[in-house]
Image (cartoon, grey):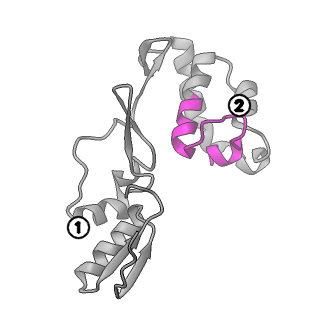
């Protein structure tokens, strides 16, 4: 390994979205920039991995649905291609079959789902900080498929796959 002595106006530590954005803005302002990243690829958690023919988003894949992040991506000419998932429904695979919420649920499951989602903002999240999502869901959600879709949403919200380790108060808040 050869170590070259180079001089830069700025060193950006981390090649994730924030570091790359900072580097672009600095370079556009006329500064010389070096980005230092410990991983072998840039992008941080904004990566899509292909496993067994399926694509999986590994990080904040919904961050550019609106707000400041979308404006920054537009300004940088990095708008993501494709559309966005509809907010009114959720699609999942359960026991090898595609199920869409709410249309793929039974009437009873749909009623529980709507009640659950409509009531989340009323929950005192501080009082359940030390309760796991799994423990809370098992005592609060009667129907298994509703509970499974709730777990899927919690994984999406938190990027945590272990519902026994994730705080219900944190996830719901």
Indicate the quadrant where residue 141 lies: top right
- The quarter in which the N terminus is drawn is bottom left
The residue at which mark 1 appears reads as: 75
Q: Quadrant of residue 25?
A: bottom left
* Residue depicted at x 45% and y 12%: 96
Left or right of residue 97, residue 152 in this image: right
Queried whether the magenta region covers residue 118, the answer comes back as: no
Q: Position of residue 147 (x, y in %)?
A: 62, 24
Quarter of the figure with residue 56:
top left
Secondary element at tag 2: helix
Q: Is residue 40 above or below residue 5?
A: above
Horizontal placement of 138 versus 8: left or right?
Answer: right
Residue on which the image places disc 2? 134
Task: Rate crowding at label 2 as few (under 14), some (14 to 19) or many (20 or more) other CA atoms within 10 Å.
Answer: some
Crowd rating for badge 1 (residues with CA inside 10 Å; few <14, some 14–19, many 20+): few
Q: Residue at x 71, y 47 (%)?
A: 125
For this rendering, which residue is in front, 88 or 165? 165
Horizontal and vertical percent for residue 46? 40, 51
- Residues 24 and 106: in front is 24
> What range is drawn magenta here?
150-173
Numbered label attached to residue 150: none
Q: Is residue 172 magenta?
A: yes
Left or right, 50 with reference to 153: left
Q: Secondary structure at mark 1?
A: helix
């Amino acid at each position: 390994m050869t170590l070259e002595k180079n001089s830069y106006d700025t060193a950006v530590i981390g090649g994730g979205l924030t570091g790359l954005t900072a580097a672009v803005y600095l370079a556009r302002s006329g500064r010389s920039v070096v980005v230092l990243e410990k991983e072998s690829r840039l992008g941080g958690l904004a990566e899509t991995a292909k496993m067994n023919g399926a694509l999986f988003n590994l990080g904040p894949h919904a961050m550019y649905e609106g707000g400041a992040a979308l404006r920054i991506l537009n300004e940088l000419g990095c708008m993501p291609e494709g559309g966005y998932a509809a907010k009114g429904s959720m699609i999942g695979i359960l026991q090898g079959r595609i199920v869409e919420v709410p249309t793929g649920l039974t009437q009873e499951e749909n009623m529980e789902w709507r009640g659950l989602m409509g009531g989340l903002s009323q929950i005192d999240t501080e009082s359940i900080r030390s309760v796991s999502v799994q423990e809370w869901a098992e005592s609060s959600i009667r129907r298994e498929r509703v509970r499974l879709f709730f777990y899927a949403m919690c994984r999406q919200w938190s990027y945590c796959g272990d519902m026994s380790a994730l705080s219900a108060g944190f996830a719901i808040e």
